[in-house]
RNA sequence: GCCCAUGUAGCUCAGCAGGUAGAGCGCCUCCUUGGUAAGGAUGAGGUCACCGGUUCGAGUCCGGUCGUGGGCUCCA
């Protein structure tokens, strides 16, 4: 036994117990910057991987959700780099928006100062996490160099006819003389002055996203790597329904003959329409009720509805209320005059803002009709009928049946009737088949300061005129007072007054800024060519990098941001600027980070500050904990003990490697491998195979880490004696170096530090990802479970390729098993090679 | 009401193709230690929510029940 050995260094002999994360993290982060280590490669021979995390709003500090989001993305970026991809992994800031103005009012700081300070602070925290971003591509949407191109793109939309102006309904605070966002309306009151908020029509800019509704819906089928629930949410949001638009006319009075189109999905029930309902905000209402007996009642009702909060208005529990207008409309199919009502359950934004009410076959209409004693007429008779007339009904019948009381259509099954009625109405000019969407056009106007100015001018002679390209960007003026009352841009003389580029006359600059969702709808394209001063992004580069291969973010953006980005991509494609249909190939919606079972929030007082955790345990431990504790898409329950556990694991790896680092270049000795080394070798290859497939196929970062932990445990078992035989050394060496490679995407500082400690040249992260040898996965001898009638009664150890007969022989000799076989005749044997033998007796 | 998740060790989660129930944390015991919310080695702990079915064999597949969480919901 005079084999040479690699002696271990004992902890008390110069090896620190703990990974000195403060020094090590600072050192590696500095080197990465100096060496521009995450500079995006443009080598065309390598496959590309565009890894993107949703950029944050710069609120000032990172929260746990950010940490989780970035940790997941960083592992993927680092993994794919080692796998030989050129990876684009950028970061930026969604930097326009209301909080900056609120801070300005509260703390008397300029929104720009507040925002850029926050960006600086968050950037420092992100660097402290060791995230591998290409910072050369950083964008901030509030920077003129970014929004210049946002404005340019807006003008392309404008030229394409996708931008229009119409009256839109807004929350309005009469005291502050300002428009309020939904979240600024608290219990129907203004968040600042507690005045009652009203609904007000104001001219607004809209973008015709509905032009793309059909494609946005159809292409959901292309999103095979999106979570199903997000696809479902988008499908519901778009809300396509087929039906008919039917034209009613006002029966008498001053407006006689005026058309009121309604949308219905049930044209088969048109003969059962016994009244009509308009939304209180319907454009015809004012003229309809003017000088009528009911005018006062109607006005009171309209006011009441206008004062209701939008959310309360659309709540199921809200009582259906209405008022008769005094006017009548003519049902085109039978010439009947039906009363016109106003009701709170009809929404001006959906369909035509008017409905034909069929109380027998629509539950809402039924309840309303009963309450106000309006007539009912049964027109769909169900097959096994429970009622023969509307008098028998206790609820609307919304199911199938045969048409009755419907003139020429009597006896027609109602599904067939839908088509027939629609066709007949089309022939007679009463209506037409239409498709209606729940999706509405995108209202982008914000009467706010801290946003991208909409690059349009109002000229008295020429109307609305686009700002010429060479005058972009339209910069936000800096010298403003933010008071919260109205938009400072309206008051700013220098900003407001402009010259019309067409006639040279005076023009007024548009003072609305744009919805911040506009800014975030194309940032993934700007990253691709972030410093281009000549265009928004180069087409070839965009075609090279798009689509984003992996997009990670919170599920709260399932509809709006992701839908707008999809829409934007399609428009940009139609403008000829890029050739992809969809922006995000694979989407991962990460779960929340919770504490004590609830989402972290200031009001609950259960917030854990990532900054404190980073300082106390280091970036690698924080990353490992947050990755290990839960799979990405599930919620993650924060646990202080868990972080300590991760910190211990970091130390455990550190100690293991440091004990042997001193002799890393010792030459190996010839000789057979010990059993322990063979086992270690097998486990090493199993870990390579397992970690790679976990990361790649199902983003199982938690299970990947568990497998790495198991490998570390095995290495501790292997080195329990202390010294390693030189003949086993190559296996051990391979195991340790593999461990560092597998762990480096999750714990990059630790692994780089140890790689260097082993005397290795260059960055570990530039090493290729290890490859496993399938032949190494199998053990020489295997344990086979022996079952009697499906229950495990013992195990036998046999050579790896042992046959059924060999195992049967061995099993019969095993006393435990023999006991169960005694006096019984084996009827059947089920053999699973390498795993088990089941004997049925 | 509808849709989608989810229920496995005290806790947080694995268990991919039905085939001996796993990881980390926590806990027990022992060892080590003038670096101590320390380290090492052992171990305990699970009728896999419940009921039924398919199967030689079911956390795993099927049906039902119960629990928990989330989303949508006057959309004509």
Image (cartoon, coloured by chain):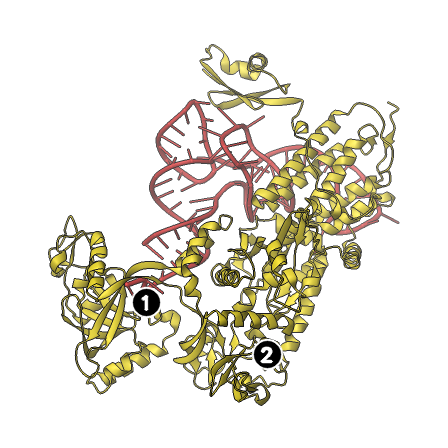
Chain colours: A yellow, B red
Quadrant showing the C terminus of chain A: top left
Badge 1 element = loop
* Tag 1 subunit: A
- Camera-side residue of A396 and A38: A38
Tally of numbered discs: 2
- Residue A235 in percent (x, y) is at 41, 56
- Camera-side residue of A16 and B34: A16
Look at the image and tell me whether residue A609 can be seen.
no
Q: Residues within 10 Å of mark 2 (few under 14, many from 20)?
A: some
Horizontally, is A563 left or right of A833 in the view?
left
Whether residue A562 is situated above or below residue A13 in the rendered picture: below
Q: Residues within 10 Å of mark 1 (few under 14, many from 20)?
A: some
Q: Which mark is residue A351?
A: 1
- Residue A646 in percent (x, y) is at 68, 49
The answer to which image quadrant residue A328 occupies is: bottom left
CA–CA distance in space, label 1 to label 2: 37 Å
- Closer to the N terminus: mark 1 or mark 2? 1
Horizontally, is A370 left or right of A711 in the view?
left
Residue underneath mark 2: A474
């Amino acid at each position: 036994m005079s084999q040479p050995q690699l002696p271990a260094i004992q902890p008390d002999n110069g090896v620190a117990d703990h990974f000195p994360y403060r020094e090590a993290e600072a050192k590696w982060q500095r080197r990465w910057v100096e060496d521009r280590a995450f500079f995006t490669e443009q080598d065309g021979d390598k496959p590309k991987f565009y890894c993107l995390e949703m950029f944050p709003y710069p609120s000032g500090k990172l929260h746990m959700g950010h940490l989780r989001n970035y940790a997941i993305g960083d592992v993927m970026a680092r993994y794919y780099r080692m796998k030989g991809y050129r990876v684009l992994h950028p970061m930026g800031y969604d930097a326009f928006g209301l909080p900056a103005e609120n801070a300005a009012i509260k703390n008397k700081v300029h929104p720009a100062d507040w925002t850029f300070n926050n960006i600086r602070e968050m950037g420092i925290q992100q660097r402290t996490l060791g995230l591998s971003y290409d910072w050369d591509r950083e964008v901030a949407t509030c920077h003129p160099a970014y929004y210049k191109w946002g404005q340019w793109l807006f003008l392309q939309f404008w030229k394409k006819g996708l931008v229009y102006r119409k009256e839109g309904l807004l929350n309005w605070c009469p005291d502050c003389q300002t428009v309020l966002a939904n979240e600024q309306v608290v219990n129907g009151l203004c968040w600042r002055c507690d005045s009652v908020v009203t609904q007000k029509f104001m001219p607004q800019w809209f973008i015709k996203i509905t032009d793309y509704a059909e494609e946005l819906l159809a292409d959901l089928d292309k999103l095979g790597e999106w979570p199903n629930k997000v696809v479902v949410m988008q499908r519901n949001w778009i809300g396509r329904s087929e039906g008919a638009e039917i034209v009613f006319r006002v029966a008498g009075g001053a407006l006689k003959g005026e058309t009121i189109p309604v949308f219905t999905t049930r044209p088969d029930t048109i003969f059962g329409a016994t009244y009509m309902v308009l939304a209180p905000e319907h454009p015809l209402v004012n003229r309809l009720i003017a000088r009528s007996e009911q005018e006062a009642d109607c006005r009171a009702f309209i006011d009441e509805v206008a004062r209701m909060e939008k959310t309360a208005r659309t709540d199921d529990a809200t009582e259906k209320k209405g008022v008769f207008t005094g006017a009548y409309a003519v049902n085109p199919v039978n010439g009947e005059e039906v009363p016109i009502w106003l009701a709170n359950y009809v929404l001006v934004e959906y369909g035509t803002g008017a409905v034909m009410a069929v109380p027998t076959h629509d539950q809402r209409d039924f309840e309303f009709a009963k309450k106000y004693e309006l007539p009912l007429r049964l027109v769909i008779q169900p097959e096994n009928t429970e009622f023969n007339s509307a008098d028998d009904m206790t609820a609307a019948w919304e199911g199938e049946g045969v048409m009755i009381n419907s003139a020429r259509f009597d006896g027609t099954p109602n599904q067939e009737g839908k088509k027939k009625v629609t066709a007949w109405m089309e022939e007679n000019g009463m209506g037409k088949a239409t498709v209606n969407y729940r999706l509405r056009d995108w209202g982008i106007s914000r009467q706010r300061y801290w946003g991208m100015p909409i690059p349009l001018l109002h000229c008295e002679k020429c109307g609305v005129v686009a700002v010429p390209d060479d005058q972009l960007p339209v910069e936000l003026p800096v010298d403003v007072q933010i008071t919260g009352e109205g938009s400072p841009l309206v008051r700013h003389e220098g900003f407001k007054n402009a010259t019309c580029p067409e006639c040279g006359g005076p023009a007024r600059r548009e003072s609305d800024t744009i919805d911040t969702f506009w800014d975030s709808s194309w940032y993934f394209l700007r990253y691709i060519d972030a410093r281009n001063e000549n265009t928004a992004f180069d087409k070839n580069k965009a075609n090279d990098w798009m689509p984003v291969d992996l997009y990670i973010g919170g599920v709260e953006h399932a509809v709006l941001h992701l839908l707008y980005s999809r829409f934007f991509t399609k428009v940009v494609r139609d403008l000829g600027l890029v050739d992809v249909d969809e922006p995000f190939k694979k989407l991962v919606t990460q779960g929340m980070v919770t504490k004590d079972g609830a989402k972290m929030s200031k009001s609950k007082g259960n917030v854990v500050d990532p900054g404190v955790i980073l300082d106390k345990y280091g970036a690698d431990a924080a990353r490992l904990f947050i990755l290990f504790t839960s799979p990405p898409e599930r919620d993650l329950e924060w646990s202080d003990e868990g972080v300590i556990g991760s910190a211990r694991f970091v130390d455990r790896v550190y100690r293991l490697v440091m004990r042997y680092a001193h002799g890393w270049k010792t030459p190996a000795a010839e000789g057979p491998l010990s059993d322990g080394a063979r086992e270690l070798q097998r486990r090493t290859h199993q870990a390579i195979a397992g970690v790679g497939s976990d990361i790649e196929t199902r983003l199982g970062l938690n299970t990947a880490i568990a497998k790495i932990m198991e490998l570390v445990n095995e290495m501790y078992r292997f080195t329990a004696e202390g010294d390693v035989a030189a003949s086993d050394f190559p296996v051990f060496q391979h195991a340790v170096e593999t461990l560092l490679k597998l762990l480096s995407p999750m714990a990059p500082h630790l692994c780089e530090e140890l790689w260097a400690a082993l005397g290795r040249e260059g960055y570990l992260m530039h090493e290729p990802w290890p490859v496993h040898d399938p032949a190494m996965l199998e053990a020489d001898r295997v344990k086979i479970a022996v079952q009697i009638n499906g229950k495990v009664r013992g195990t036998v150890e046999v050579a790896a390729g042992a046959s059924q007969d060999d195992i049967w022989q061995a099993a019969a000799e095993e006393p435990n098993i023999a006991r169960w076989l005694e006096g019984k005749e084996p009827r059947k044997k089920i053999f699973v090679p390498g795993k088990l033998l089941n004997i049925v007796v």
